[in-house]
Amino acid sequence: MNRFWKYVLLFGFFLISFLGRSEKAQAQDMDYKAYTLFLYNFMKYVEWPNTEGDFIIGVIGESPVKKELYELAKNKKAKGRQIVVLNIATANDALLCSMIYIPTSKSSELKVLSEKVKGKSVLIVAEREGLAKKGAGISFVIDEDDALKFDINKSVLDAHSLKVAAMLIRLAVIVG
Amino acid sequence: MKKHFLSLVLSATLFAPAWGQIQSAAKDTFDFYEMSLEQLLRMKAHGIPSELEELINSLILAASKRPLTARESPGIVTLITDEEIRNSGARDLIDALRLVPGIDFGVDVEGAVGIGTRGLWAHEGKVLLLIDGQEMNEGLFGINSFGNHFPVDQIKKIEVIRGPGSAIYGGFAEYGVINIITKSASDLLGVSLTALAGQMEGGMGRRNFNLSAGKKSQDFQFTMGAFLGQANRSDQDYTDFFGNTYNMAGNSNLDPTHLNVGMTYKNFSARWILDMYQTTVRDEYDTITPIPYPINYRSNFTELKYSGQVGKAKKLTITPKFNFKNQAPWETIWDGDSVAEDYSKSVQRYTGNVTASYNLTRKINFVAGAELYTDKAQDNSNDSSYFSNGEKEVQYSNHAFFLQTLAKTRIVNFIAGARYDVHSDYGSAFVPRVGFTKKFKKFHFKALYSNAFRAPTIENINLEDSAGIKPELTQVIELEAGYQLTRKSLITANLFDIDTEDPIVYFVGDSLQLDNYKNFGMGGSQGVEVEYRMRDKWGYVIANYSFYTVLNKENSEDYMVEDKKSLLLAFPAHKANLNVSIKAGKYFTISPSLLYIGKRYGYTEIDSVGNYLQGEFKPLMLANLFVSINNFGVKGLTIGLGCYDMLNAHYSFIQPYYGDHAALPGPSRELMLKLTYEVKKEKKKQE
């Protein structure tokens, strides 16, 4: 084995040693407080036909966003309505919600949920980019400079009888 | 109390640009859930970036036609910031670029110091140097002469692409690209003056002066940089192979005059750079001259550029630009008392370029463009020298087409591109490249395969041997992996493998044509580079190590070390850097740095029958220290004190090829005093 390949092996070892430390290492993880802030603004700038009762936001699966939503629910109301965070365990739970948040890890559930809430006044917000084109009302986008932005599918929102304020539309990219 | 509260709310609501400010304010004063929609759009998906994250998430412009972050950019990249340059006390580009893994310097002839990378001598047209997009390499041989030349105080950042860039930039970017971006009007917003004095042990080191100014209004930006200086390459004795010697203090001047003026108005920009660099030498080619003589490198560069988006969707951006550069490098003119050969040639390049960039989606981008340039060169000397066409003037043209596709997917970022050049004399060169990069939270990787070429220059064509000359072609494979150990530290490591076919080499011919160029043999190297970066509010640590070998590569004997088949002349197999900067309190910054240069080899003597013999240059350590004090007595005044080469290691620039030139001594221990005074208009907080 020549010397160069010895260095290649050394490099590999080096890399694996550091990868082994991954659990202990910290890095710049998603800031779900920021996501929550967007969700709160969607509550403010989207109009639901039904303004009675609690504003239920459902989250499917486990996501750190829940912790932040609980914090939001403690401190704020959605246009005067109490915010309630619901863990969506079955598809029927989706029918109780005004807004559904789909974390990236549960993106594959979008189709089922969209079918379930078809025609209902439910806003589906997806964490993964591109899902507004596939049935979500809104999906998040992370720009090249890490800025958090969002796409809106207006046709989907119309189909769910949801009206969006022009101010919010101005900040979004309309994808449908 | 209420007034304070209101003003806090108002200032936070109206002006606070970042999430961090709002978050911290929220703890004790106001409701951060109530921020405006505009503020919402400034939120970062990953929260407040650390100092390191800001750096590694910054966009790299040089490695792809569409900028990507340092960790995803399709190139092995080192980013040197203005802060790092300032804190290190870098005297010139040699000091700044030595911080980069794999980069070192060697001597050519007539006192010219050039760059080498990854063990390979890259002086003649193999590393592209850009200042604000202007190609600095001179058009006759393709070189850049380093040493108190380009102004480091005007620099905002240097992007060093340590691998090939020909698929974007063409024939001067075979082994690397150094992209210098000077401070913008927003960075300056006023005037900055810098004076630097350096004293070596045996004579004056340097006296440099820089003035930078910038002004910005809504649509208009203007910047100006002026740099004047005087320096000595060294204060040590130079001895040629025949035992002749002289002291370089006063005989190795490096005197720059550099002006850089830029303006932008809406989508239109214009730039003009004047670069006049005069050196004084006695070392010539082999034996020393009895008296010093000056060599001038004169250049000016002009660029006019427009960048406009087309259509409502703004998916298509078209950028036409025109560049003109006029150069007279290596100008050596006698006044009757000649000590070296007369050389006076000038060269002009007129370049037109149109680039179209189309964003099919946010994640898919296409770039296509065309470039046409014409080179004209004149022999201005009064002697009987002519170009190979038998005339005092020669002209060539080149047209090129380039393409790039970038697709960012969840699994990988894919980039593919190519450039096709057709030259009126030496024919065509086609250089495709493909790369895969991706960042997965803390981990990132890059796998890059690039073709590159070195375009023969006007003098290569002029001095070609009977077989003619053609572009040398290079293939490079690079693999990089990086891991963010903490939010403040990152380690990256990369492997490279370089193969060059038919390198353009210089050789001494017969008496009819003494200087010759031809394509001959092979070239290349392999190696590894590792870099660790840690950044925090208190400062930073940068440590890197680079290694190369040519054991598995075939290289021309002219570049080889005779009894070390793994090494090339002049460049060490092992090089390491440690660069630390510590903010000690509000005003003090202390920055020590260490540069280890391993064992090197070069020609050191001549035997009794006239054969040049190689010898070993011992490893050495350059230890430097720079201390700066901000607002020293006066607001905006910074005083810096430093010492370069504290251990007085006596670094010498070695000739990386068989060229009859002895090693050229560098500066000895140099004490420096640097004063900077900035008058800055406060930025509006909304910016």
Image (spheres, coloured by chain):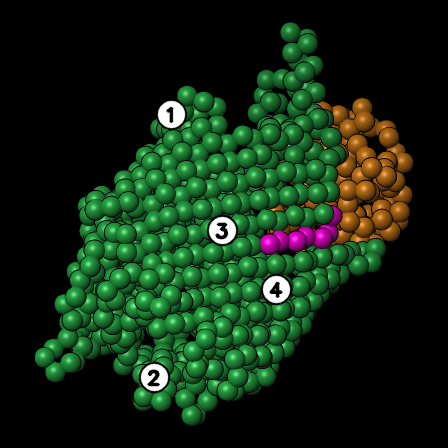
Chain colours: A orange, B green
Proximity of marks 2 and 1: CB atoms separated by less than 8 Å: no
> What amino acid is found at the position of numbered circle 3 in the picture?
His
Label 1 neighbour load within 10 Å: few <14, some 14-19, many 20+: few
Q: Label 3: state its secondary structure.
A: strand
The residue drawn where x is 28% and y is 45% is B204
Q: If you read the primary sequence from the N terminus, does the residue marked by circle 4 or circle 3 appear first?
A: 3
Q: Is residue A142 magenta?
A: no
> What amino acid is found at the position of numbered circle 4 in the picture?
Phe
Label 2 neighbour load within 10 Å: few <14, some 14-19, many 20+: few
Which residue is denoted by mark 4 in the rendering? B324
Label 3 neighbour load within 10 Å: few <14, some 14-19, many 20+: many
Q: Which residues are magenta?
A: B266-272
**Residue furthest out toward the front:** B336
On-image quarter of the C terminus of chain B: top right
Q: CA distance from mark 3 to mark 2?
A: 34 Å
Q: CA distance from mark 2 to mark 1?
A: 62 Å
Q: Label 4: state its secondary structure.
A: strand
Q: Which chain does tag 1 point to?
A: B
- Residue B85 shows in this picture: yes
Q: Label 2: state its secondary structure.
A: loop
Closer to the observer: label 4 or label 1?
4
Q: If you read the primary sequence from the N terminus, does the residue marked by circle 3 or circle 2 appear first?
A: 3
Q: CA distance from mark 4 to mark 2?
A: 32 Å
Q: CA distance from mark 4 to mark 3?
A: 17 Å
The residue drawn where x is 70% and y is 20% is B10
Q: Nearer the viewer, residue B141 or B28?
A: B141
Which residue is denoted by mark 2 in the rendering? B514
Which residue is denoted by mark 3 in the rendering? B258
Q: In the image, residue B99 lies at what x, y percent?
A: 36, 52
Which residue is denoted by mark 1 in the rendering? B585
Q: In the image, residue B177 lies at what x, y percent?
A: 48, 62
